[in-house]
Amino acid sequence: MDLADIYKKFDQIGCLTFATMDQNYPQTRIAHLFACDHEGLYFRTMITKAFFNQLKKTGKVSICGMFPKTFVSHDEQGMPYFEPGYTIRATGDVKEIPLKTLKEKAAVNEMFMLGVKDIEKYPAMTTFCLCSAWGEVYDFDFEMEHRNHKLLRTAFSFGGKLIPFRGVRITEECIACGECQERCSFKAISQHDEQFIIDHSKCDVCGDCYTICPSNAIEIAIEDPK
């Protein structure tokens, strides 16, 4: 996925959750992206807001959203039903964009004109660019209405970030009993030459394989982002 594709996914949602840190506590608010280019994804806030101070202090933000925005209904057994859709998230580094730079971008890309007009109307407003990040599109179809598996995860990164692995995987301790594959409702596990392998693009990290494995061959792996 390139930045234009990532922006379109976020823009289709509209209102997004932006998370920052403040004095060791997470803080969230609703905002939106208004533009993108080869440097990153752009959003605005006021210099008088705590959001601004958190962005300046840490230089980091995490953004997420869900499409479609539907109320979760329940079937006759009381189980939740989610209309097929997707979530998307991105986490990374931000930098403040001067108004002069924003005007230069607006001269060649109309997307940025909204930011220029907003700042001219509200002088306390400023722009930030998510310039280096990693993330994921989590495309779900839990009832398998449109395909033969529940989930398709697409990881992405830009601005030099690497994509950290976070999930479960099968180690050499596997005895090829097949219990994990039988248990996996996401159809994420297959067998290759007597070795079972998890397809992480289909894996929900639900933990079923981890809890059922008789040889403790499933490990939880969380890599540090770089």
Image (spheres, rainbow, N blue to C red):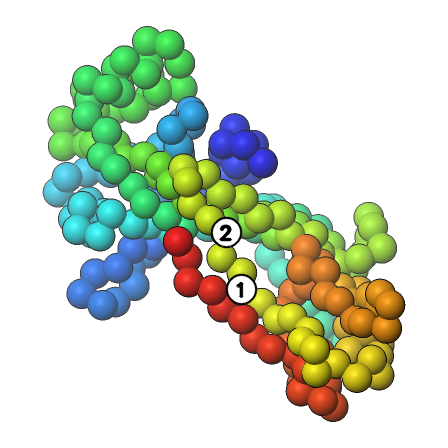
The x, y position of residue 123, in whole percent, is: 14, 26
- Bin the neighbour count of mark 2 within 10 Å (Cα to Cα): few under 14, some 14-19, many 20 and up: some
The x, y position of residue 186, in whole percent, is: 76, 65
Q: Is residue 179 left or right of residue 8?
A: right
Q: In which image quadrant can residue 220 be found?
A: bottom right
Asked whether residue 172 is in view, the answer is yes
Residue type marked 1: Arg
Asked whether residue 65 is in view, the answer is no
> Where is mark 2, residue-wise?
163
Residue 133 drawn above or below residue 40: below
In-front residue for pair 55/117: 55
Quarter the N terminus occupies: top right
In-front residue for pair 199/105: 199
> Where is mark 1, residue-wise?
166
Q: Is residue 164 left or right of residue 201?
A: left
Residue reaching furthest bottom?
214
Residue 18 drawn above or below residue 159: below
Residue located 87% across and 68% down the image:
193
Residue type marked 2: Ile
